[in-house]
Image (cartoon, grey):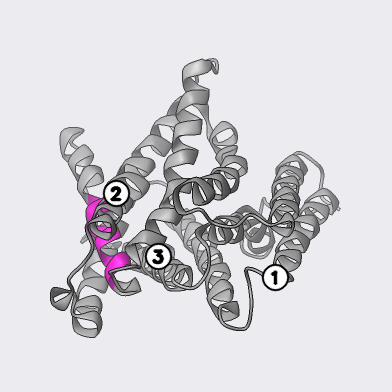
Amino acid sequence: MRETGPIDYFLLTLLALIWASAFFNIKIATYSYGPLTIAFLRILFGAIPVVLLCYIKKIKIEAFSKDWYWFAAIGVINLVIPFFLIAYGVQKVQSNLAAILMAITPLSASLLAHFFTKNEKINLIKTIGVLIGFSGIVFLFSDDILINENNFISAILILFGSTFYVIGGLLTLKISNKKNENVTASILIWGSIVLMPISLFLEQPWNLNPRLDSTLSLIYLGIFSTGIAWLLRFYILKHNGLVFQAQVAYLIPIFGVILGFLILNEVITSKVIISLIAVIIGIYIVKRGTKVKLI
């Protein structure tokens, strides 16, 4: 693993920007497309660069191997469900709120990992971090300007989406012996297979007359925020390690809030700022807590 240099920080920042840009692009996509169609096309377009990379690198894609049920389950839990819930929720809430709500994923991961893994138990430091981070989310829900009775459920669904990301990540540990590119390509393939008939039957996208900006956002979501972002993540993991790559969690909500303001002119209230700070501090403390002995 090489010494971290300026190019590595640039790539990490680029990855954070690409992932953070997903939120306002989801918002724009909802102007014309339903949440099922957004989830399906995002996964389908995202599969293209990953499958292409596997072909170039001669990596066997095991989507239909004897372990197909793991890929199918992870595809549904880690892609289909959260992509749908986020797209459904963003229809009624600002994209910057979605960025903050989704930022609690590392906090949820710490809690679930305590119960479902052997070597990632909770400790005092992690507990403090989780409490601070979640207190920021609770405080965010007190912002009557942005979260009210009309979109409260939508915000809750986005939170559920983040939880499914974590569960999918835990399931991925079951096939951790396989190449990342193979796993990602396989779950994207299964996600597309599962969502295609559902989205076609329920939303009938061929009847739509979509706006150009919605279509461009949807294509961007798939190719860049899903496919290329995952490939960039692989590169950073390989050359800089998990600890360095995990720092992207601090940047995504910050960039998500800024981009929502710049692109969609979304409101940034004082409670949004306070909540964002609390979540970032919580993530930082949780990550520091991984080096502390268990209680």
Is residue 2 visible to us here?
no
Residue at horizontal 52%, vertical 24%?
Answer: 9
Residue at 46%, 54% (x, y): give it: 264
Answer with mark 1 or mark 3, whichever residue precedes in sequence: 3
Specify start and end residues of the magenta stretch as a single range: 37-47
Q: Which residue is mark 2?
A: 220
Q: Residue furthest front?
A: 265
Mark 1: secondary structure: loop
Residue labelled with disc 1:
141
The residue at the far left in this view is 206
Is the residue under label 2 in contact with that under label 1 (CB below 8 Å)? no
Circle 3 crowding by C-alpha within 10 Å: few under 14, some 14–19, many from 20: many
Disc on res. 83: 3
> Is 20 a magenta residue?
no
Circle 2 Cα neighbour tier, 10 Å, few/some/many (<14 / 14–19 / ≥20):
many
Q: Quadrant of residue 110?
A: bottom right
Tag 3, which secondary structure? helix
Number of the front mark, 1 or 3: 1
